[in-house]
Amino acid sequence: MSQKHLQSIHVSHYKHTAGCATEVMPIPDVVKISMSQHIGAPCQPLVKKGDYVKVGQKIGDTEAFVSAPIHSSVSGTVKAIEEQRSAAGGMDTLVVIETDKNQEIFEEVKAPEAKDLPEFVKAIKESGLVGLGGASFPTHIKFNPKNIDDVHTLIVNAAECEPFITSDHRLMLEDAEDLIYGCQLVMKYIGLDEGYIGIEENKMDAIEHLDQLLKSKGITNIKTFKLQARYPKGAERVLVYEITGKTMNAGVLPADLGIILSNVTTIAFVGSYFRTGMPLISKRITIDGDAVNEPKNIIAPIGTMITDIVEFCGGYKAEPKKILMGGPMMGRAIFSDELPIVKNNNAILAFTGPQALVPEETACINCGRCHYACPFKLIPTALADAYERRDAQALSDLAVMQCMNCGSCSYVCPARRPLGFINTLGKVVLKEAGIK
């Protein structure tokens, strides 16, 4: 499927918090740290009820290959190891810590040293780093591609094209030094020749700030790349095409095209970790939506309950009818605010007005808007028909696996059909039929 005619749509950005400097949230009374914060096998708790833990101490790990360890974000006493329904619907193991507010640092926290790529990859794994743009894939695996001699380019995804979310924007303004240092480290150890930071043009202050910093440091092999402020420019396959012109079809990894691609927060954490040695224990997130009294960008300890975060933002104006982890296009609607934040959270959005409503679906009028909006020129209506018939072969022929679930088709549909979600169900049909 060619990407020659990549499309994108205007999605009203609602960037209420773009000018809101990041606030550090006070340590809550209790955190509940999930043992399932990455794609792959969940971690097993390394602590038990009654144990005293310190900031940066490893409290969860597993020997599974696709995994990343989990560290305590606070100092305090483990009050329980409990099970809870997760935002994804499965059961989750939580380490519940009553904080002492002292934030005593674990003795083994120190800046790592690495002589070569294996030591760099080992350090990244020990940091607990996963993809912080939403995917939560363990980063140490991504930074050690099998075809490393063919990989020459770093792409940093700083597009942040979803409405409402501005946490990455604030990071570029407030932690640019860590971002650039992280780029340099990744390029040094993997052996990359060039780096690009893809940023939408509605963040010119971030582009100008990074350009000035790169120039002042005499860095010429890392450049900002200005993108149109159109959704979904931050999608992995779209971003690769925009910057390099290379087609990245479903099943193709960036490394297959000679590229290491990571979210801007992930790369900035690399810089911070090699400077301080503190593993991944906190997250910058945007809190917004018409149900929130004081929309903000905040840094909170991982494991902080959403209720505590909202309280820090002035509480609710009115009872929310919908709460999202992530953005309105690709975020996950959650069933309760009695859930903790995890590593890959970048926003909590709470709505009580029109954006909380699920519109009534009507009949397709064959307008073709979904086809025009699709970045890969799929035909969502035909895919929906194939799904209704449970026709696996037709779903394969219509390239349902090319769908990246950006939601553009659903967004523009005047009949309010959930076309993007139907494609997700279509992929399940394909999988059950054994068709790749």
Image: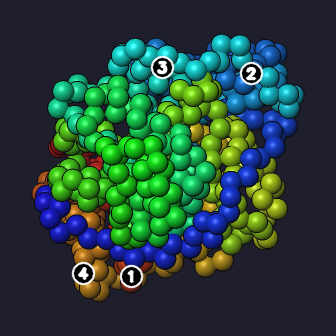
Q: Amino acid at mark 1?
A: Ala
How many numbered discs? Answer: 4
Q: Amino acid at mark 2?
A: Ile
Q: Is 328 placed left or right of 409 in the picture?
A: right
User: Label 2, on which residue?
Assistant: 105
Disc 4 from disc 2: Cα separation: 57 Å
Disc 4 from disc 3: Cα separation: 49 Å
Q: Nearer the viewer, residue 255 or 398?
A: 255
User: Label 3, on which residue?
Assistant: 123
Q: Residue at (79%, 23%) from the top-left corner?
A: 104
Q: Residue at (49%, 33%) from the top-left corner?
A: 270
Q: Is 283 placed left or right of 363 in the picture?
A: right
Q: Nearer the viewer, residue 5 or 23?
A: 23
Disc 1 from disc 2: Cα separation: 55 Å
Q: N-terminal of the two: label 4 or label 1?
A: 4
Please identify, in this view, whether the residue under mark 1 or under mark 2 is nearer the observer: 2
Q: N-terminal of the two: label 1 or label 2?
A: 2
Please identify, in this view, whether the residue under mark 4 or under mark 2 is nearer the observer: 2
Q: Is residue 19 above or below residue 26?
A: below
Say the numbered circle drawn on residue 368: 4
Q: Amino acid at mark 4?
A: Gly
Q: N-terminal of the two: label 4 or label 3?
A: 3
Q: Is 2 placed left or right of 251 in the picture?
A: left
Say the numbered circle drawn on residue 415: 1
Q: N-terminal of the two: label 4 or label 2?
A: 2
Q: N-terminal of the two: label 3 or label 1?
A: 3
Q: Tell me the quarter of the picture where residue 282 sits.
A: top right
Please identify, in this view, whether the residue under mark 3 or under mark 1 is nearer the observer: 3
Q: Residue at (41%, 31%) from the top-left corner?
A: 185
> Helix, strand or loop at disc 4?
loop
